[in-house]
Amino acid sequence: MVAPGFFLGLVLPLILWAGSSAGVGFRFASYISDYMVLQKEPAGAVIWGYGLPGATVTVSLCQDQETVMRKGTSVKADSNIWMVVLDPMKPGGPFEVVAEQTIGRINHTLNIQNVLFGDVWLCSGQSNMQMTVSQIFNATSEMSNTAAYQSVRILSVSLIQAQKELEDLPGVDLPWSKPTAKNLGHGNFTYMSAVCWLFGRNLYDTLQYPIGLISSTWGGTPIEAWSSGRSLKACRVPKQRFIPPHSVSGPSNNSVLWNAMIHPLCNMTLKGVIWYQGENNVNYNTGLYNCTFPALIEDWRQAFHYGSQGQTQRLFPFGFVQLSSDLSKTTSQDGFPQIRWHQTADFGYVPNLRMPNTFMAVAMDLGDKNSPFKSIHPRDKQTVAYRLHLGARAVAYGEKDLIFQGPLPEKIEVLSGKGLLNLTYYQKIQVLRLDNKIFEGPAKEPRQHLYLPLTLPRPLDQLDHMGQVEGQLVQQPGPDAEPPLVQVPIQN
């Protein structure tokens, strides 16, 4: 006769093993964690993760120990993924998100705390987006200015590349966090993105509700690395290509950063994206940028809309920064003017027919010749972020009567007999006195095909002009002279 304790000794380990194995592999997606911000109404936030095939998963949203909402789903057998879409929520918090997996009679529970609902923005691009708060003007003051912005939460994605599209992020350098001096200025070109942070802070000042900021950036990278194979194929970007020496310092292979640092985020519900990139296409596939950039925007919009079960707006707002000036160059004959033009799909402005629901922060006036990070990395990120937030307020949030762009030329006449260029703008031109070069813009001398600086020959204390500007082409003397200038006196 076998003692009862013998059976208990056999069965109990099996029960314990079954209970523990039910929790193996049950987890949230890697970017879902404490302190995160989920997208507010009118969209529904997506919560997802991995579990055991055949199990059911119940996600509960709780506040003050009361259940506000409960959603159920099952784990897909082919992918081990579970996903729920929460009902649209008003901005605010904090909340607790609880996920419970049930298989048979065995349950396993996960939870995250201090979750807010607000607007979620993704910030991406290369080194000018990657520059941290510790690298910009007034860094000490900016890093200490966090007390009033504890509802602006930040996350920074690890620098990883992949040959195929990944489902989940392989790594996160900075999980969702409240802002502190340490995580805003962790180190040069690490985290947190200064443009991203300052953009979100400006939005919070206006909106007064939570803002979630995700930085996914890598310096020295061309747009091809951030683009899916679909969008590159649409622009006929060759798979085999020659990259000029020293033109890129980061990953350059097609799609490797899209695969590892953007595609894993596509299940997330977003409000919009801001982008700062283009320097590494100045000498690489420059002529294709008027296709690759609009194609990237369109492809990201499709992917995020589909991945979020239609919750991310199909034409979500997409803002970007116009390339600044590289003042280390001894000549203006470089690819920067071409890339600036191609950034607008060759329209010269946004939004336009090829780039709807977009906005641009002008930055060509923010050159920084003395930047310790080279002049290609200007330290005035406050102005960049402020201009981006103006564009977002107008385009993403529909704020009326807000000046966020321009003035744009309505009519351009070349008066060849007088050697004059006459520009008519669609709105008044207001110029405040700064120095002897108040107004600068690109001009092109047709015979030499040079992009020329546009300067004012004299300072003005203040000007309120009805829109006409007349300038004269001036060739500078001397064998080592700079290219011709277009001098533009403002007519009173």
Image: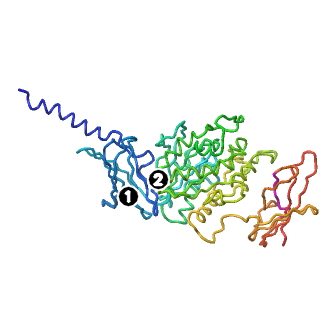
The local secondary structure at tag 1 comes to strand
Residue 38 falls inside the magenta stretch? no
Residue hosting label 1: 95
The residue lying toward the viewer, choosing from 174 and 38, is: 38
Q: Which residues are magenta?
A: 451-458
Badge 2 or badge 1: first in the primary sequence: 1
Q: Which is the main secondary structure of the residues drawn in magenta? A: strand
* Left or right: 268 as drawn, with respect to 66: right
Q: Name the amino acid type tagged 2.
A: Ser
Q: Quadrant of the image for the C terminus?
A: bottom right
Q: Give the vertical position of 90 relative to 123 (above or below).
A: below
* Left or right: 186 as drawn, with respect to 378: left
Q: Name the amino acid type tagged 1.
A: Phe
Q: Give the vertical position of 427 relative to 97 (above or below).
A: below
Residue hosting label 2: 308
Residue 457 falls inside the magenta stretch? yes
* Label disc, if present, on residue 448 of the rendered structure: none
Q: Position of residue 345 (x, y in %)?
A: 69, 54
